[in-house]
Image (cartoon, grey):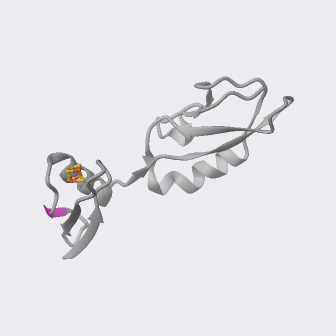
Amino acid sequence: MEKRELVCVACPLGCGITVTLGDNGEVLDVTGNTCKRGDAYARSECTAPTRSLTTTVRVEGGKDYVVPVKSAAPIPKNAMFDCMKVINETSVKAPVKIGDIIIKDILGTGVDIIATNNAE
Ligand code: SF4
């Protein structure tokens, strides 16, 4: 049995949550959360953690050299490194418009990488 201490990030209150995990990593108990969202966050963080990804992608043939991008949804934490490798090897041709899909379904995660600004 293992206990993990988390700070819930689902709202600004930041409740401290304790999760009790079984020997196979299964969630046995969640305490300290003051609402259901905290319970869901804690279970997800302990079994399938995800993170939003924000970075930049190279732009070719325009005035701007890079364009800021983000994942359209959180991606599995254990895929972050490989996703960053793909993004670092990617370049797009100018112009880029905010909301353009830069990489569709990155590494089969089902999540698109989208531009968060324009690049001339
Ligand atoms: S447990 Fe609920 S109230 Fe507490 S930080 Fe998470 S979302 Fe907010």
Camera-side residue: 108 or 89?
Answer: 89
Chain part drawn in magenta: 27-31
Q: Position of residue 96 (x, y in %)?
A: 71, 25
Q: Is residue 13 left or right of residue 117?
A: left
Magenta segment: does it hold 29?
yes
Camera-side residue: 68 or 75?
Answer: 68
Q: Is residue 58 above or below residue 85?
A: above
Magenta segment: does it hold 63?
no
Q: Is residue 111 above or below residue 95?
A: below
Q: Is residue 32 left or right of residue 64?
A: left
Camera-side residue: 15 or 59?
Answer: 15
Q: Residue at x 86, y 29 (%)?
A: 61
Q: Position of residue 11 (x, y in %)?
A: 29, 48
- The dominant secondary structure in magenta is strand
Q: Quadrant of the C terminus?
A: top right
Q: Position of residue 97 (x, y in %)?
A: 66, 23
Q: Is residue 57 left or right of residue 54?
A: right
